[in-house]
Image (tube, rainbow, N blue to C red):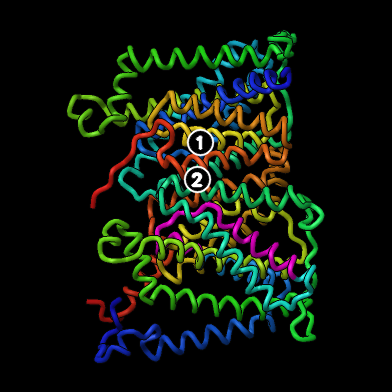
Amino acid sequence: MRLPSGTFNISYIQDMMVFRTIHHRIGLAVFLILLFLFPLFATQYWQAILNTIAVTVIALQGLNILAGYCGQISIGHSAFMAVGAYGSALLMKYLDLPFWPCLLLSSVGAGVVGIIFGLSSLKVKGFYLAISTIAAQYIITYMIKTPFPQVTGGPISLHVPPVNLGGFVLETETHFYYLIMIITILMTFISKSITRSHIGRAFVAIRDNDIAAEAMGINLYRYKLLAFFVGCFFAGIAGAIWAAYSKVISPDDFTLMNSVWLMGMLIVGGLGGTLGPIFGAIFIKALNEACVIIGPIITSLIPQIGAQFSAALVEMAFGVTIVIFLIYEPRGLAHRWEILKESYRLWPFSY
Amino acid sequence: MIKFIQLLMTGVAVGLIYGLMALGFVLIYKASKIFNFAQGEMVMVGSFLAWTFVGLFHLPILPGLLIAFLIAGVVGYFLERFPFRPMIGQPILAIIMMTLALAVFMRGFAILLWAEHIGIKFPSFIPEKTIYILQAPISSVILWSLILVLTLVVVLSLFFRYTRTGLHMRAAAESHQLSQSMGIRVTKAIAQSWAIAAVVSAIGGFLLGYVRGIDFGLAELGLIAIVAALVGGLESFNGAILGGVIIGVAETFTGGYIGRGLREVVPFIVMVLVLFYKPYGLFGLEEIERV
């Protein structure tokens, strides 16, 4: 990464800093303050949108580690979210455990389930791996729907008990906003730390060429399974929070299409960077909301196209967006952002 | 015993339809090394398309189907040009996402055009009769689809063996560089394989739609075709058909003897097991990788 004009690294500590200059730190502080003051001047609607985006960001950070850093394609990510969601909901409902242990236990559970399905990554890769994660998607959804419908609520839905943090019951959108934001910031920090450590380097080596990585002494078994564990752990956290936040969960919240959408968000945002998931989640959510608003307007102008136009528009817009990004900007919005920053780095003396 | 024969015949017939759709998948894979996750949506759209001409416009059955399959073929031919030619040489994740994006787009398209007609059926034109084989009652529809699929498989294999176009496509599947230096236009061959795959998927969609009604769930059955292709091994046409039959039989047997819920996941369980013991399928080529 190029540094702003006149800034030089003269020690390893400076070289390893995430936020290198005073401007970075001020920018971060302003961003965080604005994020926490947001509920004071935003309506419920906007808070709900930000909540959804933040939960998605958590899941995407995990998917980013798994697919963006380690190169293991997963199209079953929302199923691992389902493991976290159902795990924490059932723990809270039947064992009356408090929220935090439930969150942690169910996420570890999701990670372990991820390892089980990640076992196939030791034998196959690329397309074969993608389809075996699709298998994971179907098998997990089946486990929720069919064998124990009295416990899991079957195909219908499961009511999640309210979250109680030491006597304080989370009820409103704003309460959840603060909970979700704190966890999202924490998880983003953790994912950044993982990718900067020797583990992240090993992941990148495996992504670029796993045979070469093995020849260089990286234990493929260990790191591939670790990637699956970490990725699915993040998904588990996202799922557990989603369950607590939406209060009712059903297998329809975690379909194959949701997994495809997660993967699409990652493509739009950019793989292999911390910013990518954030950009991707915001962009696709914005696109989605725009379609939801525009769809009925067009339907009312041209009634012949039918009431289903809105639903169709959402899917078609998503498909077209992914196609355009893959052809014209495969490195995603994060790369565009880098280019933008680069062009202003030496401003106004850009040469 | 009667139930066994009945389930076996149904399984084989359904499996052959899966095999047919898997054939479409293998065709595209062999020609261009693209894993077409939109296979399921191609099946669904093909089925709706066939219904539009036969059921909505009330064309006679044969011309209606021919027009529908022709349209499917033309659309398939141009799919190669727009979304997939820029993808040559891209990483595998980009290609997979491209096909998934295509799948989402086609689903949206189908919702837009056909959402109000969900759950419709083709007008029945095969005489409904029950035929007894070893005392087991078998619906004539199943026998007809069995015959149709077998004919198609024979026609396709003759096409690949004896016609010029078929030979070109096989050559392109073998090696792009070599076939180009022999004067074969690889892009054309790939486009042709997309077209044939689209037609084959549409035929599979028509058969499935005829048996079980047309809805958006057909897309998931098309996904099972991919599973069948994997079980058989991606490099082999015969493997695709056999994989389809294995999956179909496994499905009907679990549906008949164990329960409906498990029936939906059994293809995936079979696939995971096969992939674990034979990672490249039953008839696939093992890839040896070097750094």
Asked where in the image residue A239 lies, by quadrant, the reply is bottom right
Residue type (three-letter) at the residue carrying disc 2? Ile
Pick the residue in front: A282 or A11. A11
Q: Which residues are magenta?
A: A63-91
Residue type (three-letter) at the residue carrying disc 1? Ile
Q: Position of residue A345 (x, y in %)?
A: 32, 79
Q: Is residue A59 above or below residue A177?
A: above
Is A87 inside the magenta-drawn segment? yes
**Residue A161 seen:** yes
Rendered image: mark on residue A267: none
Q: Is residue A82 above or below residue B163?
A: below
**Residue B83 seen:** no
Residue located beneath label 2 in the image:
A131
Q: Is residue A51 left or right of residue A267?
A: right
In space, the residues marked 2 and 1 are separated at their CA atoms by 9 Å
Q: Position of residue A224 (x, y in %)?
A: 42, 61
Rendered image: mark on residue B226: 1
Q: Name the residue rendered at 29%, 22% in the picture.
A: B168
Q: Name the residue rendered at 71%, 27% in the picture.
A: B213
Pick the residue in front: B46 or B163. B163
SS category of the residue bearing label 2: helix
Q: Name the residue rendered at 62%, 54% in the picture.
A: A291
Main secondary-structure element of the magenta-colored stretch:
helix
Q: Name the residue rendered at 46%, 62% in the picture.
A: A225
Which residue reaches farthest front? Answer: B1
| Mark 2 chain | A
Which corner quadrant holds the N terminus of chain B? top right
CB atoms of marks 2 and 1 within 8 Å: yes
